[in-house]
């Protein structure tokens, strides 16, 4: 594989990575919007049906029925958040972001490596380009 072909392949891989990053950003924004809408809806419900709840704070009284309901509501919210994460195309966002950062770093290394080979002009070897691409593929394959 010649250096021009290797460089072209690397550029395509980087473009694919950038598209994946954009997809992930959209998935994060979608999840954020869903959670924001749920929060706003719940706040409106509480303000209209239970306005005194913001002053009363009976859920802080140990052993009170309100405290049990508060903890049950909190548990339900956590479970709903987990379900939302699972149903979202950007599930396991932290793991995916970590992987994308690794792939992006590998892409930067490829760019720098190939640019150095081209600019340096000395000792340009196809096996060096293949080595850089192999590093990129290894990082990308670690999904």
Image (spheres, rainbow, N blue to C red):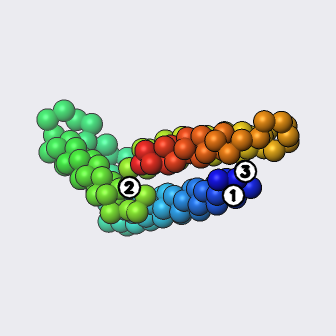
The label number, if any, that marks residue 3 in the structure image: 3
Look at the numbered disc 2 and give the secondary structure of its residue. loop
Q: Confirm or deny contact between disc 3 and disc 1 (CB under 8 A).
A: yes
Instruction: Characterize the local packing of mark 3: few (<14), some (14-19) or many (20 or more) Cα atoms within 10 angstroms.
Output: some
User: Could you tell me how many numbered marks the image carries?
Assistant: 3
Report the residue marked by disc 2. 91
Quick one: label 1, few (<14), some, or many (20+) residues within 10 Å? Answer: few
Residue 118 vs residue 124, the one in the foreground: 124
Tell me which residue sits at (53%, 63%) in the image. Answer: 23
Image coordinates for residue 94, horizontal then vertical, percent: 44, 44
Q: Where is mark 1, residue-wise?
A: 5
Q: Position of residue 117 (x, y in %)?
A: 78, 40
* Residue 7 seen from this side: no
Q: Secondary structure at mark 1?
A: helix
Which residue is pictured at 60% across the width and 56% down the height? 13
Q: What is the secondary structure assignment of the residue under circle 3?
A: helix
User: Quick one: label 2 or label 1, which is nearer the N terminus?
Assistant: 1
Q: CA distance from mark 2 to mark 3?
A: 38 Å
Question: In the figure, is residue 10 to the left or right of 124?
Answer: left
Q: Is residue 131 above or below residue 51?
A: above
């Amino acid at each position: 594989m010649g250096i021009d072909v290797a460089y072209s392949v690397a550029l395509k891989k980087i473009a694919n990575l950038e598209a994946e990053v954009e997809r992930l950003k959209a998935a994060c924004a979608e999840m954020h919007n869903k959670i924001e809408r749920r929060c706003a809806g719940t706040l409106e419900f509480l303000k209209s049906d239970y306005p005194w709840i913001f002053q009363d704070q009976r859920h802080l009284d140990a052993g009170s029925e309100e405290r049990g309901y508060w903890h049950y509501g909190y548990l339900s919210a956590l479970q709903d958040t987990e379900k939302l994460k699972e149903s979202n195309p950007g599930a396991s966002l932290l793991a995916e972001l970590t992987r994308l950062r690794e792939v992006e770093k590998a892409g930067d290394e490829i760019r720098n490596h190939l640019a150095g080979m081209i600019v340096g002009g000395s000792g340009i070897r196809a096996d060096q380009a293949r080595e850089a691409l192999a590093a990129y593929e290894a990082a990308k394959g670690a999904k």
